Amino acid sequence: MPTAEKTETVCKGISGAPGICIGKAYMVGREGVDVIPQYSINDRQQAHELNRFKTAVQKAKKELLEIIGSTPEALKEHIQILETHLVLFKDKMLYGRTLETIETEKVNAEWALKNVVAEVRIMFQDIEDPYLQGRSADIVHVSDRIMRNLMGAKEESISSISKRVILVASDLSPAQTSQIQLEWVMGFVTDHGGTASHTSIIARTLGIPCVLGLSNATTILHNDDIIIVDGIAGKVIVHPEDSTLLLYEEKKRRFEEHRASISRSSHLPAVTTDAMDVNVLGNIELAEEVVSVRDHGGDGIGLLRTEFLYLSRSNFPSEAELFEQYREVLELMAPAPVTFRTLDINGDKAIAYTLSPEEANPALGLRAIRFCLRKKEVFKTQLRAILRAAAYGNAQIMFPMISCLEEVLEARQLLRDCAEELALEKQRHNPDMPVGIMIEVPSAVVMADVLAREVDFFSIGTNDLVQYLLAIDRGNPQVAHLYNSLNPAVLRMIKRVVDEAEKAGISVAMCGEMAGDPFHLPVLLGLGIRELSMNPQSIPAIKNMIRHMESHDCRTFTEGLLQKSHTYQVMEAISEKYGKFMQTDFS
């Protein structure tokens, strides 16, 4: 039999993460779930089918919990999507509807689940929003896991791969991507997915190239096929000719040089082409992360999440414990600034030993500054520790979740009380550090002019601000697709905060996820944000982009954006104006 000729083929998809890799394809299979059995059941068998489905769901949840527990540190920040999947196991649209289908249609559990997922897909198929498409994919990933357990099939373990390969899959679930070992996986390509998908986010976090939405990758590719993944142009070249291999080896070399250059220059100031300085800082939780901020060229720490010193323990930390930790961070980072966000617990960061009554809606309950003003002794212990540590470095303090003037006045009074106590005790401290508030509640935006008179700076927390402004629970799969930082209402909110801060002569920083996304950068510079704080790994690329941008041009562009009525119009305008620039920047 003659061997089929392998001709070079170029497949166009969507760029999920920049970079180039060349290697052998590794097909990620889905053993035994392609042919779904269908059979009718009688009343006597119904209870058995219902129990079989519930058992499969429980087993799937257990598997997912084990994956969450073993997720590498580099991907811990993305665990939220896996936790969302845990919720989906009990989702009415999936769990409840499948049980109902078994009972009403008298069919086996596999067939009931298959039909329910098909209905969900039909609901989502005509929706173009990429984020919503991503949530549809979440439901499919969860149902796949349940289906494998129903059919006794095994999921291929990505973590067991022990050779250098490029993953090829119909789609990769968040659970699968969380198992990727960078030592063996060079990149990946999928039939489905888009730039807003979890797969894409993970690839960017890991710094490996990926191309998504190829439609037919799993059809045309086979194990050990030689492929080139061009994550910059969003294409995959199958069976490349020698000349193509040489060309891409050179492109790969240039890209890696470019990335290394960005890292080498990350310690340089971030100044636009028209000489506007922008401070780029890191968000951290523990003193151990200071090294990462410094290594990535951070100009300081824009957000120290102090609540993490309160978690995973059986009681509140003492003033001495907090002081030592805070002092260490300040001394390691000196003379660069460190902004302490006071305790922001409850909401999604509950601690077991507070004995707080259970709340129906903790995100709107006794959390952050509300908790601290209720538990004044706990709050004062932290304030005293920060005041003492502030004598050893460049410290700032800010209060989270401020929703009214009274909270600012009371928190500041407690800070003064603590400073006076320390003075009477003749303890070394710094009572003059700048005091700011986080702007993350819409009422704080409305009252920004009043609040600005009482503080030295604002720091916009976009994660909560977007959630509260749009009334969207980011963890709720039913509505999470509506969460978008580029919603025109969000942009107008930020504009108001910046305008009122400028009138009052105080500074404005941003420390939410929006700050570290290159796609948002022209808008933030155009809105007048001059200080951005983010995941330390994002700092080099953001600083590099700033050095290639003109602030005046960003301002003019953003004035036009503020006239847009729809989120998609904002996103299209950014892509049209800066999309090529961003791609060039990474190439």
Image (tube, rainbow, N blue to C red):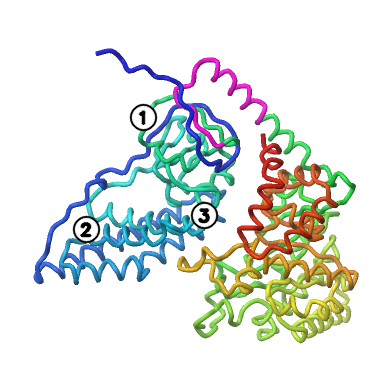
Tell me the quadrant of the picture where the C terminus can be found.
top right
Circle nearer the viewer, 3 or 2? 3
Q: Is the Cβ of the residue at disc 3 closer than 8 Å to that at disc 2?
A: no
- Element under disc 2: helix
Q: Which amino acid does label 1 sit on?
A: His
441 to 295, vertically: above or below: below
Question: Pointer 1: what residue?
Answer: 222
Q: Earlier in the sequence, mark 3 or mark 1?
A: 3
How far across and down, in percent of the image, does residue 30 sit? Answer: 31, 44
Q: Which residue is drawn at 25% across and 69% down?
A: 99
Rounded to the nearest angstrom, the CA distance separating label 3 from label 2 is 28 Å
Q: Give the range drawn in magenta.
A: 234-255
- Element under disc 1: loop
Question: Pointer 3: what residue?
Answer: 130
Q: Earlier in the sequence, mark 1 or mark 2?
A: 2
Question: Pointer 2: what residue?
Answer: 111
Quarter where residue 528 is shown: bottom right
Rounded to the nearest angstrom, the CA distance separating label 1 from label 2 is 30 Å
Rounded to the nearest angstrom, the CA distance separating label 3 from label 1 is 28 Å
Circle nearer the viewer, 3 or 1? 3
In terms of secondary structure, what is the magenta stretch mainly?
helix
